[in-house]
Amino acid sequence: MTTTNIELQERIDEAIKEARKLSSEGKTTQAAEAWDEVEELFAEASHKKQRTNFQQYCQDNPDAKECRIYDV
C-alpha cells in the first residue's frame, strides 16, 4: 500500500505533535524516540519528492508491461 502525500503529511503532523508533547512533559527518552520518528517521516517525504512520475506509476502498477525489469 502506498502512502499519499496527504496521509504522509498527516502522519508527520501527528508525530510532531506527539514529540512536542513528550518534550514538554520532560519525558526525554520517549521524546527522543518520537523526534527520531519525525526525522524518518521527513526522510520518507523527501524520498517521495525525488521520484519521477514514471517511478510513481511503476510503484503503483508494478505489473505494468513498461515497468517490468528483466535480468540479462
Image (cartoon, helix red, strand yellow):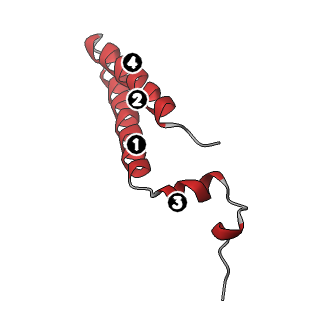
Distance from label 2 to label 4 (Cα)?
10 Å
**Of labels 3 and 2, the one closer to you:** 3
* Helix, strand or loop for disc 4: helix
Distance from label 1 to label 3 (Cα)?
15 Å
Q: Callout 1: few (<14), some (14-19), or many (20+) C-alpha neighbours within 10 Å? A: some
Q: Is residue 28 left or right of residue 68?
A: left
Q: Callout 3: few (<14), some (14-19), or many (20+) C-alpha neighbours within 10 Å? A: some
The residue beneath circle 4 is 18
- Measuring 66% from the left and 89% from the top, which residue is drawn there? 72
- Whether the residues at callouts 1 and 2 have beta carbons within 8 Å, the answer is yes
Q: Is residue 41 left or right of residue 25?
A: right
Tag on residue 12?
A: 2
Q: Is residue 50 left or right of residue 64?
A: left
**Of labels 2 and 4, the one closer to you:** 2
**Of labels 4 and 3, the one closer to you:** 3
* Helix, strand or loop for disc 1: helix
Q: Is residue 50 above or below residue 27?
A: below
Res 2 quadrant in image: top right
- Measuring 47% from the left and 36% from the top, which residue is drawn there? 5
* Amino acid on which the number 2 mark rests in the picture: Ile
Please tell me which of labels 2 and 4 falls first in the chain.
2
Distance from label 1 to label 2 (Cα)?
9 Å
* Amino acid on which the number 3 mark rests in the picture: Gln
The residue beneath circle 1 is 45
Tag on residue 55?
A: 3
